[in-house]
Amino acid sequence: MEPPVHCIRDLFRQLGLADRPAEIAAFLTRHRPLPAKTVLADAPIWSAAQSRFLGEGIAENADWAQVVSELDVSLRDFAPVRQRPQERSAPQQV
């Protein structure tokens, strides 16, 4: 299995949302749980452009599909939000 093309930070940037790990965690905490019957792209938290992008990302099985699916799961999950290892910020060099 090949690694995903994009990570959650890339997706948040693409959606025009803040993409720092703490901001992503706050977004997920604020907007979940997403009701089970709600399709991710139809959730009222998105603008029309964001909704279209998310829907097309899944429908076309685009290179965004895996990370969009991960976002979908994260918005339905009650567990504390944690960063995946590849999403952690690199240490700042001084």
Image (tube, grey):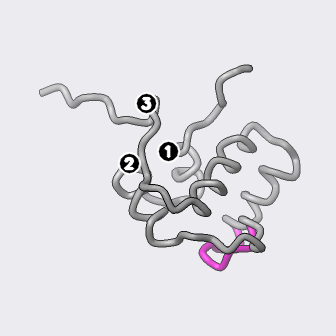
Q: Could you tell me the amino acid type at mark 1? A: Arg
Q: Position of residue 65 (x, y in %)?
A: 75, 44
Q: Position of residue 24 (x, y in %)?
A: 44, 56
**Element carrying mark 3:** helix
How far, Cα to Cα, is label 1 from label 3?
A: 12 Å
Which amino acid type is marked by label 3?
A: Pro
Query: Pointer 3: what residue?
Result: 85
Which residue lies under the disc numbered 2? Answer: 21
Marks 1 and 2, the one that precedes in the sequence: 1
**In the image shown, does 87 or 16 lie closer to the viewer?**
87
Q: CA distance from mark 2 to mark 3?
A: 11 Å
- Marks 1/2 in contact by CB < 8 Å: the verdict is yes
Q: Nearer the viewer, mark 2 or mark 3?
A: 3
Badge 2 density bin: few <14, some 14–19, many ≥20, Cα 10 Å: some
First-in-chain label (2 vs 3): 2
Q: Residues within 10 Å of mark 1 (few under 14, many from 20)?
A: some
Farthest residue in the top direction?
Answer: 1
Q: Secondary structure at mark 1?
A: helix
- Identify residue for label 1: 9
Quadrant of the drawing holding the N terminus: top right
In the rendered image, which quarter is residue 53 located in?
A: bottom right
| Mark 2 in CB contact with mark 3 (< 8 angstroms) | no
Q: Amino acid at mark 2?
A: Pro
Which residue extends farthest bottom?
44
Residue 43, magenta (yes or no)? yes
Nearer the camera: disc 1 or disc 3: 3
The image quarter in which residue 52 lies: bottom right
Bounds of the magenta segment: 41-49
